Image: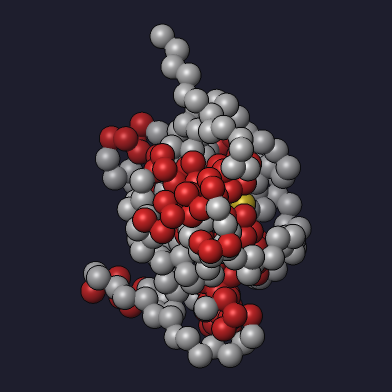
Amino acid sequence: IYNDYKNGTRNIKVRAEVNLPQIKEYTCSTFIGFPEKVPDIYRAEEFIKEFREFEKNDNFPNFIIMLLPNDHTSGTRPGLPTPRAAVADNDLALGKIVEAISHSKFWKETCILVTEDDPQAGLDHIDGHRTVGLVISPYTKRGEVVSTNYSQINMFRTIENILGIPPLNQFDLAAEPMTDCFTDQPDFTPYKALPNKIPLDELNPSLAEITGEQHYWAQKSIEQNLDDYDRIEEETFNKIIWHSVKGYDVPYPEIIEND
């Protein structure tokens, strides 16, 4: 699929299936979520094509939900992109989307909020619940890391405030919007996407090419269900990614529980 996209041949047709008839007319038919076999840069291009029509017709929606799933990676399953290539694909796609929007006439009134559905128990030195949260707009505090303890419900409340809609339940009613991320002094400078440094077609080797621990974790990758989200064995998959990036001789971190 990536080669079909890269070569511009478009012999492979991608179509999204909508299970809820109520949202079918609001859904882009060529923008698909899972599986990860579809490159995120393809998804970005499909959005940008639709976005150009929004610009042309001056009908950009007030609210858009978009999924770029390839940062989940396919582990080290043979023949699919390496974890670092999958994340590079995800980063480049997001950058291209922000670049397109920030160079448009809609930029002055646009806010892009980016997060993960969950951190997939990907532990770091602070907490296993931490995950990325990006606020992108002319009214964002540029170049600042905000350490306020925000959760997904704070992001949800921020969206509600921007759209001027009331809270849906007691949880978002009690949540604070992400005000620490914003300023009243806008900077309308557009964003320029950075080129990827890792080849997007860097593929995992076949089982015949590898041995030992690398072979073991590649086999474990084959056993994972990658057709949809939340189908994998999280701890196993975290170990697969850890060893693929850190090295197969580097021990996986132990969890230290404090009383």
| Residue depicted at x 66% and y 36% | 145
- Where's the C terminus, which quadrant? top left
Which of the pair 86/136 is nearer the observer? Answer: 86
Is 103 on the left or on the right of 227, as rendered? right
| Residue depicted at x 64% and y 85% | 7
Which of the pair 164/112 is nearer the observer? Answer: 112
Q: x, y percentage for residue 42?
A: 55, 74
| Residue depicted at x 51% and y 61% | 207
Is 120 on the left or on the right of 246, as rendered? left
Q: Which quadrant of the view contains residue 81?
A: bottom right
Q: Is residue 42 visible?
A: yes
Which of the pair 239/20 is nearer the observer? Answer: 239
Is 65 on the left or on the right of 145, as rendered? left
| Residue depicted at x 51% and y 53% | 215
Q: x, y percentage for residue 143?
A: 73, 42
Q: x, y percentage for residue 12?
A: 47, 86
Which of the pair 151/132 is nearer the observer? Answer: 132
Q: x, y percentage for residue 234?
A: 39, 43
Q: Is residue 157 visible?
A: no
Structure colour scheme? secondary structure
In the displayed structure, 124 sits above or below 21; it is: above
In the displayed structure, 257 sits above or below 76; it is: above
Callout count: 0
